[in-house]
Image (cartoon, grey):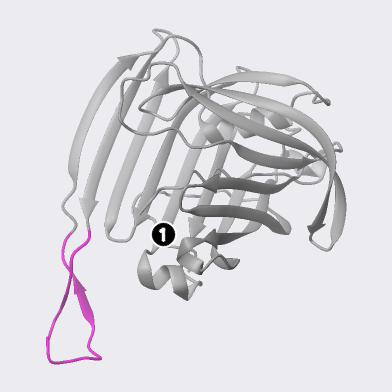
């Protein structure tokens, strides 16, 4: 099962009250491609939580994505993605992050802590496979007993060539910048395994159909380059992200075209929260 890069977005209102609040944004994830007979279907829901883009306090940002309420994908390849990062807007760098991914029965976790004094990262990785067994094989309606998950763990330390962000912090970083038509921004990024460079090309256009209205927006087209292309994991194709062209910089839409089809994430709800407690380890879903 391919692993789409679903870097999803952020934003909300301004004002002194927002200094302590966190953004809580929901997105609907659509898919069109060979698995859906080239028809658009909804496959997942995503939630972004972070301090507003205008806030300068160091804090956590998180993205969680689940197919639990979408039967077509859930029955084939249950998908859970949880990414939590600690980002310093003043230092313009990521301090650490944890990403957990479940696709079907495959589980993968990567935890990264950056040491910017000696320009290194400490990486802890774990992989596992879920195994289910019925307590009574003749009980067709019976409960399922989940066997204990056996994680294969490994850790390592690597030197870095420059100061970097993770993918979510990269988006938060761009939201704080003065964007304009024709601007191209180079952003160094680490996914915990590779040093990448993102080229973000900025265009101005109106985006219709988001929460029932048309938005003046910046369209950011991301192209990705591996700074040390000696590993076998492919780089994702170009991805487009739209953010509102106002002081709020609301993330509105993400669109990516992959060999297996098109992934389209659209903002569906804007809210706020005073709490931010996200644990990505073995994240089971929103319920």
Estimate the x, y position of residue 96 in percent, counting from the top left.
45, 29
Magenta-highlighted residues: 130-148
Image location (x, y in percent) of residue 82? 45, 49
In-front residue for pair 111/38: 38
- State the quadrant of the N terminus: bottom left
Q: Residue at x 51, y 54 (%)?
A: 261
Asked if the stretch drawn in magenta spans residue 144, the answer is yes
Residue 261, placed above or below residue 124: below
* Left or right: residue 15 compared with residue 115: right
| Residue 247 sits above or below residue 136 on the image | above
| Residue 136 found in image quarter | bottom left
Residue that carries the numbered disc 1 in the rendered image:
79
**For residue 205, above or below residue 272:** above
Q: Where is residue 159 in the image (x, y as percent from the top left)?
A: 34, 12
Residue 35 in view (yes/no): yes
Instruction: Tell me how many marks there are.
Output: 1
Residue 126 lies in the magenta-colored region: no
In the displayed structure image, the side of residue 222 where residue 197 appears, left or right = left
Residue visible at 75% across and 24% down?
A: 177
At 69% from the left edge and 28% from the top edge, which residue is drawn?
Answer: 174
Comparing 216 with 58, the one in front is 216
Predominant secondary structure in magenta? loop
* Relative image position of residue 64 (x, y in whole percent): 51, 52
Dot 1, crowdedness within 10 Å: few (<14), some or many (≥20)?
many
Residue 56 in sight in this render: no
């Amino acid at each position: 099962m391919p692993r789409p890069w679903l870097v999803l977005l952020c934003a909300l209102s301004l004002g002194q009250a927002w200094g302590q609040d966190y953004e809580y944004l929901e997105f609907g994830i659509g898919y069109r491609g060979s698995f859906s007979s080239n028809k658009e279907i909804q496959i997942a829901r995503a939630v972004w939580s972070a301090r507003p883009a205008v806030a300068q306090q160091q804090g956590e940002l998180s993205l969680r994505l689940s197919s639990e309420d979408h039967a077509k994908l859930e029955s084939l390849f249950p998908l859970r993605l949880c990414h939590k990062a600690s980002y310093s807007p003043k230092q313009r760098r990521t301090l650490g992050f944890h990403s957990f991914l479940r696709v079907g029965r495959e589980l993968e976790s990567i935890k990264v802590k950056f040491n910017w004094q000696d320009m290194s990262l400490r990486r802890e990785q774990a992989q596992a496979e879920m195994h289910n067994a019925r307590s009574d094989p003749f009980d067709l309606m019976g409960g399922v007993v989940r066997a204990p998950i056996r994680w294969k763990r490994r850790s390592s330390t690597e030197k870095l060539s420059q100061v970097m962000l993770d993918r979510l912090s990269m988006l938060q970083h761009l939201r704080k910048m003065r964007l304009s038509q024709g601007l191209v921004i180079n952003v160094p990024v680490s996914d915990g395994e590779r040093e990448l460079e993102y080229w973000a090309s900025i265009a101005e256009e109106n985006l219709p159909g988001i929460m029932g209205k048309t938005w003046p927006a910046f369209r950011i087209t991301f192209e990705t380059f591996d700074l040390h292309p000696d590993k076998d994991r492919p780089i994702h194709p170009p991805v487009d992200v739209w953010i509102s062209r106002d002081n709020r910089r609301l993330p509105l839409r993400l669109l990516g075209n992959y060999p297996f089809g098109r992934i389209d994430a659209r903002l569906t709800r804007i809210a706020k929260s005073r709490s931010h407690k996200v644990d990505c380890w073995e994240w089971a879903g929103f319920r």
